[in-house]
Image (cartoon, grey):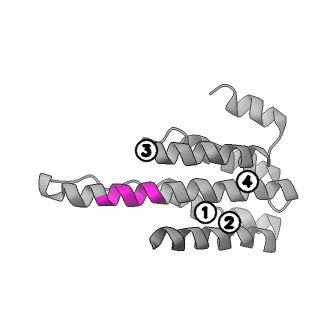
């Protein structure tokens, strides 16, 4: 199904992070999960569109969950120096923290589950300054 396709695409994209130069990750790979993380359903204009709206909300929620999982993979790649730590600190961690505040429970759960992997790609100071204040 669609979930399997998204999972496979995420795995492939995360694998690419190990194969390309560190400096290329920010503009070649990272824009994809960041764009997915911002997906929101369109607002219905009338009551007849409500069933379609519910379906669209489910899809956009799935896309944000995929984003959280992919950001976790990319953040974890920083542990092996495949991705610069600064990129995790300045871009990936804030994106995951934003997903932790998502209205969808499943998105928040995926983002919370992504945090340990992402934090593995940062420093202890980042954990104290970015996570503990929340």
Vertical relation: 1 (above or below) 33: below
Circle 4 SS class: helix
**Mark 3 or mark 4, which is nearer to you?**
3
Q: Which residue does the numbered mark 2 point to in the structure image?
A: 27
The kind of secondary structure element at disc 2 is: helix
Q: Within 10 Å of the Cα at label 1, are there few (<14), some (14-19), or many (20+) other Cα atoms?
A: few
Q: Position of residue 42 (x, y in %)?
A: 31, 56
Using residue 66 as the reference point, say whether residue 47 is left or right of it: left
User: Which residue corresponds to mark 4?
Assistant: 75
Residue 78 visible in the picture: yes
Q: Is residue 93 left or right of residue 126?
A: left
Q: Is tag 4's residue or tag 2's residue first in the polypeptide sequence?
A: 2
Residue beneath disc 1: 31
What separation in Å lies between label 4 and label 2 (alpha carbons)? 15 Å
Above-or-below relation of 88 to 20: above
Q: Earlier in the sequence, mark 3 or mark 2?
A: 2
Residue depicted at 67% across the width and 54% down the height: 72
Asked if the stretch drawn in magenta spans residue 73, the answer is no
Mark 3 near mark 4, Cβ–Cβ under 8 Å?
no
Q: Which residue is denoted by mark 3 in the rendering?
A: 104
**First reached walking from the N terminus: tag 1 or tag 4:** 1
Q: Residue furthest top?
A: 133
Q: What is the spatial separation of the Cα atoms under label 3 and label 4, in whole angstroms?
A: 22 Å
- Label 3, residues with CA under 10 Å away: few <14, some 14-19, many ≥20: some
Left or right placement of residue 76 versus residue 52 in this view: right
Which of pointers 3 and 4 lies earlier in the amino acid sequence? Answer: 4
Q: Comparing marks 1 and 4, which lies closer to the viewer?
A: 4
Q: Position of residue 134 (x, y in %)?
A: 62, 28
| Mark 1 or mark 3, earlier in chain | 1
Q: Which stretch appears magenta?
A: 55-62
> Which label belongs to residue 124?
none
């Amino acid at each position: 199904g669609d979930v399997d396709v998204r999972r496979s695409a995420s795995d492939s994209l995360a694998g690419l992070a190990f194969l390309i130069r560190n400096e290329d990750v920010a503009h070649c790979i990272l824009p994809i999960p960041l764009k997915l993380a911002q997906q929101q359903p369109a607002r219905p204009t009338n009551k007849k569109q409500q069933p379609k709206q519910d379906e669209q909300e489910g899809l956009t929620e799935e896309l944000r969950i995929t984003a959280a999982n992919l950001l976790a993979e990319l953040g974890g790649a920083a542990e092996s120096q495949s991705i610069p730590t600064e990129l995790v600190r300045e871009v990936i961690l804030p994106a995951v923290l934003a997903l932790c505040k998502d209205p969808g429970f499943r998105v928040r759960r995926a983002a919370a589950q992504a945090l340990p992997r992402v934090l593995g790609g940062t420093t202890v100071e980042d954990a104290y300054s970015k996570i503990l204040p929340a």
